[in-house]
Amino acid sequence: MNHFKLTWKNIVRRKSRFFFTLSAIAVGIASLVTLLSLGTGLETEIRKQANVLGAHLVVTPRGWCAYEQISVLTGETLPEAIPNEDMEKIAGIKGLTAIPYLVQRTALENQPVPLIGILPAKMKQFKNWKIGLGRYLLDEANVVIGFGIAKQFKMKLGDAISVRGQDFSISGILEEVGNRDDLAIYMDLSIAQKIYGVGDNVSFISVQVDDINQIDKYILEIQNVANVAVVSDKQLLKSVLAIVGTVGSALQMVAAVAILAAFFGIVNTMMTAIYERRREIGILQAVGAKKRTIFCLFLYESAIYGLLGGIVGVVVGFIFSYFAAPYIGQNEFTAFLGSEQSVQIFSVGITMKALLFSILVSALAGVYPARQACKLSPVEAISYE
Amino acid sequence: MNNVIIRTENLSKVYDTGFRTVALQDVDLQIPTGSLSCIMGPSGHGKSTLLHLIGGLDRPTSGKVFLEDVELTSVSANRLAEIRSRKMGFVFQFFNLLPVLTALENVQVAMMLAGISKKEQEDRATELLNLVGLEDKLQSKPNQLSGGQRQRVAIARALANDPDILLMDEPSGNLDSRSEGELLEHIRKVNEQGKTIVIVTHSETVAAMAQKTFFIRDGALAVD
């Protein structure tokens, strides 16, 4: 006989109560794990997309809001406000490469698809794209599509794509790159500007510098030659992560409420158990249990609820996040991430955090009841009928 | 005073729950080492209160209890728990076994609380249950045992840590006459092994076995 065996026998003596209390903590932890898992996946994916951009600096029109900055990463339609004149001035600065983007949308089979106007040769070199099928030909009659678009819409070389009433033929399909570059149609910049009627404006310019140590100098130079805002990739990432973090924190508050409910569930279970077992507490004291021993026995009991509820919650949480991810992936904001990529199927970090948190919260919930238990006098407890 | 194991001095217990009830008043008694003593008297006159105070389960309002040279009334709750664990064994009228544990485990619990190893717990608990004739009931839960068998488990548990004193509160109060006879036989054997036994009882049969009987009436003591 040892303390844990005694504790376990007491826990499982009322099986339905054990089940429901365990369920409460498991639901709380499962919601926390789901949100942490999705959130971590989202953050990882955003970092990955920021790398895909391949830019040290992003030049945007002045006064863009954070959502528009995020859209640089997500591929949403953006206002086109940087004129070609500014673009040329920026491109003229020594020691940097400027790549303009015109980000628009078209539809394939009634589904929105990003259409990006680019300078074909410059972009190909910049991104190091390789052609999977066909030729890399972008002109008045031809476009190139990403691997994902071809797969999703079952498109082949020579298929026609209609953009604002004008037909284009697919001249080439890019090799799979495993990021959102797979999910767009690429058109020659000047043609796209003409079709969308945006004059000679572009949405944003990504800039790669030769000497990363002089990044501040480049920012100043760009702002001197053009009336634009310049944000570094790190700042951009920081502001996107801050927004994602805020959303994540709000969601974690929901999980916190569930865990708080479980906390009170455990308090209630333990108080009921103590009330029912007053006599047994007295017996234990009579046969030599110290107050500290009684306190520990009840604390172990609530901590075991935390451990088991935590294990069930972690498993359920990861399973749920796996199945929930495709639905979350349909959201406009997160669609670009791709469903499979945005989930951490299993994370040791999240598992350890969730288990520790579960045990801690449950043990904390057991403190007050355990104190009440060890305050009982042996005679009072034994005399209880 | 070497032949006295328990001694009380002016022991009083007053309950004040709205109105004052004197449960015990100025009780002086001495229990000889190795004796079998009885405490008798009408119900509600303070017998159990006296036993609880002697066993350190309760604190007196005034007066002192000595176990050999240790004044129980002045030691800390933790020290008192240690003394209960190592020096005393309790047997109650309603058996007071833990319902989720088997007979063997109920005996083991007392040893677990005294910090005895699992192996030793098991060996000694089995030996004690054999001693009280329950060798075939080791894995039975209390609800699978008769009243007499439960009380024998309680005696085995009380003896688990080889205490000097056994304190029994109406041990045969819930037993039929046959079970009472068997129980008394076990008590006699234990006493013959040199244990001091104090029994609170209404039973003349139990009292007949005692070497010393104390009568309590209205919280005060009269020696037979």
Image (cartoon, rainbow, N blue to C red):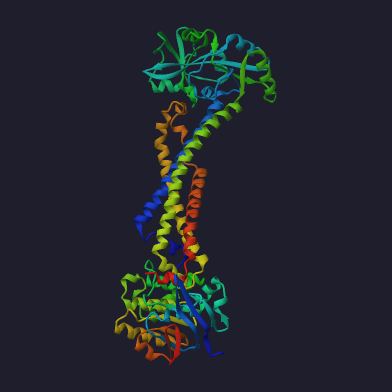
Asked where in the image residue B43 lies, by quadrant, the reply is: bottom left
Asked where in the image residue A160 lies, by quadrant, the reply is: top left
Q: Residue at x 56, y 27 (%)?
A: A51
Q: Residue at x 49, y 42 (%)?
A: A347
The answer to whether residue B161 of the structure is visible from this angle is no
Q: Position of residue A175 (x, y in %)?
A: 48, 22
The answer to whether residue A46 of the structure is visible from this angle is yes
Asked where in the image residue B124 lies, by quadrant, the reply is: bottom left
Along the horizontal axis of the image, is A88 left or right of A137? right
Task: Say above or below: A301 vs B86.
Answer: above
Quarter of the figure that contains the C terminus of chain B: bottom left
Q: Nearer the viewer, residue A92 or A362?
A: A362
Task: Say above or below: A304 vs B152.
Answer: above
Quarter of the figure that contains the N terminus of chain B: bottom right
Q: Position of residue A195 (x, y in %)?
A: 46, 8
Q: How many marks?
A: 0
Q: Position of residue A180 (x, y in %)?
A: 49, 24
Q: Position of residue A78 (x, y in %)?
A: 50, 18
